[in-house]
Image (cartoon, rainbow, N blue to C red):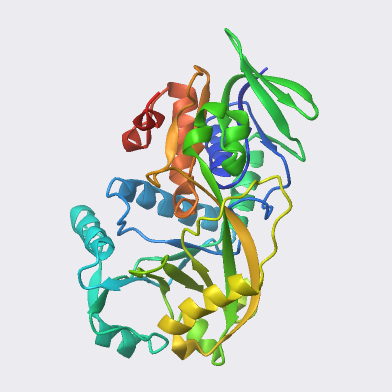
Amino acid sequence: MRHVIVIGVGGVGAFALRELARRGVSVLGLEAFHVGHDRGSSHGGTRVFRHAYFEHADYVPLLRRSTDVFRELSASSGRSLLEVCGTLLIGKDTCPVVAAASAAAQQHRVPVEMLSATEIVRRYPQFAIPTDHHALFEPGGGFVRPEASIRAAVDDALSHGAEMREGVRVEGIQERANEVVVRTSDGDLHAERVLVTAGAWTSRLLPDLARVLRVTRQVQGWIQPEDAALGSPAKLPTWFVVRTDAPPVYGIPVDPAIDGPPRVKVALHGRTEPMDPDAPRRPVDDADRAELMDAVNAWMPGLKGELVDAKTCIYTSTPDEHFVVDHAPGYQRVAVVAGLSGHGFKMTPALGGAAADLVLDGKSELPIAFLGADRFGS
């Protein structure tokens, strides 16, 4: 019988598998699709990372730990996982999001710089910024490559003794006095402990969380600028614009030497269209493209680009948009990490470590108390 089974080897699952294997634990990862697949949330080539965190200042230690692990894994794997090109957070002068990011930066001594609308455009002529807006610029921000990071973490886990099975669908979890039975498409498996990191499929396995996990369809696109240099990390940071009348819009430059053709990845943050992760995906349509391009053209007319590709992905979110990192409700031997979508991948190394702590020790020294499932009631 294995010590731990990890169900779902996306971002958190991959780093938890790595952490457990490095601690000498007998661990098996189960993935319904394949490592680095595009059916969930951990894909799309790039994800923003930043440390001046407006969502909650307690995330900052998790972010710093994750950045360290990404760098360590980059060095050991020979893969370029992290790109530092700065992060620009734009909003009205009275924007509470920018103010919260500034407060988190001050509390945790994250180097940042405040820019006026004029200074933003002078530095980055791709933008058109109203005069009543400003920005927080974090030079240490940038982006991380999710598929490459997952593959590197899994490879590292395997080199330290972990097992991995792909194409295995988990159909149920049954806890007994001294073990957990994981019912799969390949038969029953037994473990002392189980970690559920199944993303949009978490509610299928842990029904008590179904009421607090909302699965939504998101659209991400890639713009090809007329001037390729304007979309490169050397000329453009990752950026996030807080709009007063619509969802935020954000973007990530593409490094042609690593990530393919010169493009800028763009998306709206937090679209609310519900979806079933097992249902056929509704393809990106003209309305999706128009909504995305209207936002980009309003804020970044200097790109003068064409939308050359667009794909869907999934968010799995909680009502307060914070994660769940805890023991699974109703279980003694099962832990869960869920509800990350929208801002979680940048923290997957630290969350994988915290999850390993929970399944082995029942607690973690990392600051995860505010992410407990009990905040939603029984």
Q: Is residue 141 above or below residue 231?
A: above
In the image, 308: left or right of 128?
right
Residue under the image location 38 percent in, 32 percent down:
376
In the image, 312: left or right of 365?
right
Q: Nearer the viewer, residue 205 or 288?
A: 288
- Point out residue 150 in the picture as x, y percentages from the top left corner: 60, 50
Residue under the image location 19 percent in, 53 percent down:
107
- Point out residue 136 in the picture as x, y percentages from the top left corner: 27, 70
Q: Is residue 208 among what the camera can see?
A: yes
Residue under the image location 62 percent in, 57 percent down:
147
- Point out residue 119 in the picture as x, y percentages from the top left corner: 26, 85
Q: Is residue 63 above or below residue 376?
A: below
Q: Is residue 64 above or below residue 300?
A: above
Give the image quarter of residue 200: top right
Q: Residue furthest right?
A: 186
- Point out residue 79 in the picture as x, y percentages from the top left corner: 59, 61
Q: Nearer the viewer, residue 40 or 142?
A: 40
**Quadrant of the image containing the N terminus:** top right
In the image, 281: left or right of 318?
right
Q: Is residue 43 among what the camera can see?
A: no
Residue under the image location 63 percent in, 17 percent down:
174
For the image, the number of numbered tags is: 0
